[in-house]
Image (cartoon, rainbow, N blue to C red):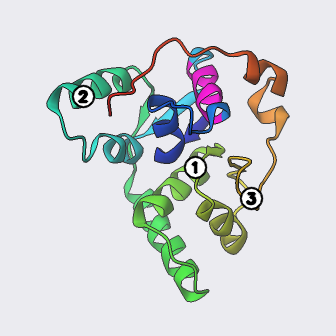
Amino acid sequence: MITVDTSALSMFFRRSKNQNQVIAKIVADLIDREELVLFGIVRQELLSGIKYLAQFEKLEQLTQSLPLVIASHEDHVLAAKYYNLCRAKGIQGSVTDFLICAMATRFDVPILTTDPDFVHYAKDLSVNNFPIYTSSRFSHIIPLRHDLIKHNTHRILEVICDFSFSGI
């Protein structure tokens, strides 16, 4: 299983010529193989701020079929610890990001993200149990661990996404 943050999931739903298609294809492949787990906070963040009700309802419906995991009390406490540790080291981050890190730690799942902040969190928290998969457009890249995603890069690039939600 692999989880995604809002940036990666948004790329899947908002595919355009200017965005990183590889991330969208990886997300599509994970969904197809039923290896993606969605954290409730990511779903909430994705649904927040959508201007039109019809778009909100469509996105709500599309994400409803994904396996959803809700944060526990312990996840929130660990997220606060992560926040405080990073802040003490001068690293800024959102409470949402630290909750994603805490949940990834508890469920021992890697995070697919395009947000380079997660690389800093992983280094500064010395958390090794959530590998970070980032877009190649950032300078700090933690490479994909093929043993975790159980397929090779050629397979990722061959995936064709079945639908597009370009109206958001």
* The stretch drawn in magenta includes residue 86: no
Q: Is residue 91 left or right of residue 122?
A: left
Q: How many marks?
A: 3
Picture coordinates of residue 74, whole percent (x, y): 44, 59
Q: Earlier in the sequence, mark 1 or mark 2?
A: 2
- From this view, report whether residue 2 is shown above or below residue 156: below
Q: Is disc 1 surrounded by few (<14), some (14 to 19) or many (20+) residues within 10 Å? A: many
- Between the residue at mark 3 and the residue at mark 1, the CA separation in whole angstroms equals 11 Å
Please name the amino acid that badge 2 sits on.
Gln
Residue 127, compared with residue 150, is above or below; it is below
Q: Identify the residue under disc 3.
A: 128
Q: Is residue 118 above or below residue 135?
A: below
Is tag 3's residue or tag 2's residue first in the polypeptide sequence? 2
Say if mark 3 contacts mark 1, CB within 8 Å: no
Q: Which mark is residue 104?
A: 1
Residue that numbered label 2 is attached to: 55
Label 1 – label 2 distance at C-alpha: 29 Å
Looking at the rendered structure, the kind of residue marked 3 is Asn
Residue ID at (31%, 27%): 59
Q: Secondary structure at mark 2?
A: helix
Q: Secondary structure at mark 1?
A: helix
